[in-house]
Amino acid sequence: MSDPTVITLGCRLNAYESELVRRHAAEAGLEDAVIINTCAVTAEAVRQSQQAIRRARRERPDAKVIVTGCAAQVDPDLFAGMAEVDHVIGNAEKVKRETFLGLNLANSERVQVNDIMSVRETASHLIDGFGTRARAYVQVQNGCDHRCTFCIIPYGRGPSRSVPAGEVVAQVRRLVEAGYLEVVLTGVDITSYGNDLPGRMSLGRLVRQILRHVPELKRLRLSSIDQVEADKDLMDAIAEEQRLMPHLHLSLQAGDDLILKRMKRRHLRSDAIRFCETARRLRPDVVFGADLIAGFPTETEQHFENTLRLVEECGLTYLHVFPFSPRKGTPAARMPQVDRKEVKERAARLRSLGSKVLARFLEQQHGSVVEVLTEGANVGRTAQFAEVKLSDEVPAGALLSARIQGDDGQRLAGEVLAG
């Protein structure tokens, strides 16, 4: 029996949930279904979701086409109006086994999308075999209580809610017993972790508990964090826990205070710089990635220059650049827009700078000996998440030492060391 086809757009959390969806659909006997797990982060993401649906119907005319994910949650009528679609299910519904069991019934509802804002719990879903044999992802949190003016995601994901720490620790232990050497904690806004739990739980305390109770775990990594929410326990863990990887991906978005205010972010550029300086003082080998938006409404050339300067002032290494795209239903879509050509040009300038800072970082690694977690035949990642092409073919899921001999501007080249 073959598994259902699941097409995933968007974030790591969506990819994680797609594995759960695949399992539920297979158990429900929906092996002939095509499930599109959509993204709503930009208008372009919604358009790509629609394209994927049309392509799926062309290629699989007899399949049951099921649409879920954030775009389906935010605008179910859009997808229900597509002739190619058999069922539309919401984000809360897609993680429930009974939803897929019901889709096999002749009288099942075509649209099952409930009020995501009423959801108050996030269950811990135990998923084995997700990602590569080297790395697994654990969802610790879902939803978001913030209202950034450019973002529709809170309306797709609902309020922030956390998985109890004991369930997270149990899942990490199970994954380590299954042979995984690295676990990534993921969610929509993981630095808000614990606000809805009893006691004084936080992301930092969760990290400490995982590393204390699962001593066999070789590497723990964090997905994107909102640096303004970093608690003292998290900063202490960055300083003291060598198994917490020295790579932090930050939700910065812009480097100009006025633009940050119009985005309704909760930090100033000085806060971002201070966080990076503090983290680097606590952990000198730490590297930073960041999400940055180019061409936000009302952004002038001077505002954009401040974002360019922030890259150097924070010492960023990995840039994830988004050209601003107005998302219907958000305040930013109603603000005065920057000319589309200018938006694309600014995004290109940011990406060009990103290539330069990455190349500079890679060059600094020449001659060093690094620990690499292998992901494929001859490719792996360092603790700082730099990709390494290795001299020898090795199985995925091995930790080994390599001497860095050079780079190609995108990834390192390493010689595997004996022993």
Image (tube, rainbow, N blue to C red):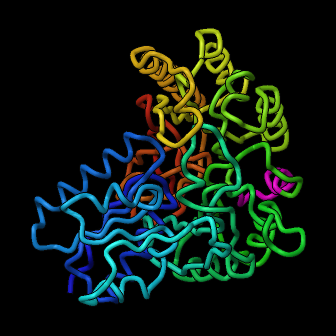
Locate the N terminus and report the quarter of the image it occupies: bottom left
Coordinates of residue 223 in the picture (x, y in percent): 61, 54
> The magenta stretch spans which residues?
234-244
Q: Quarter-wise, where is residue 78 in the image?
A: bottom left
Q: Quarter-wise, where is residue 234 in the image?
A: bottom right
Q: Residue at x 67, y 35 (%)?
A: 252
Q: Is residue 212 magenta?
A: no
Coordinates of residue 134 in the picture (x, y in percent): 48, 65
Left or right of 8? Residue 164 is right
Q: Residue at x 56, y 55 (%)?
A: 155
Coordinates of residue 9 in the picture (x, y in percent): 38, 54
Is the stretch drawn in magenta largely helix, strand or loop? helix
Name the residue nearer the viewer: 346 or 119.
119
Left or right of 379? Residue 167 is right
Name the residue nearer the viewer: 326 or 401.
326
Q: Is residue 366 visible?
A: no
Coordinates of residue 214 in the picture (x, y in percent): 71, 77
Q: Is residue 106 visible?
A: yes
Q: Is residue 24 above or below residue 54?
A: below
Q: Residue at x 42, y 53 (%)?
A: 39
Name the residue nearer the viewer: 356 or 203.
203
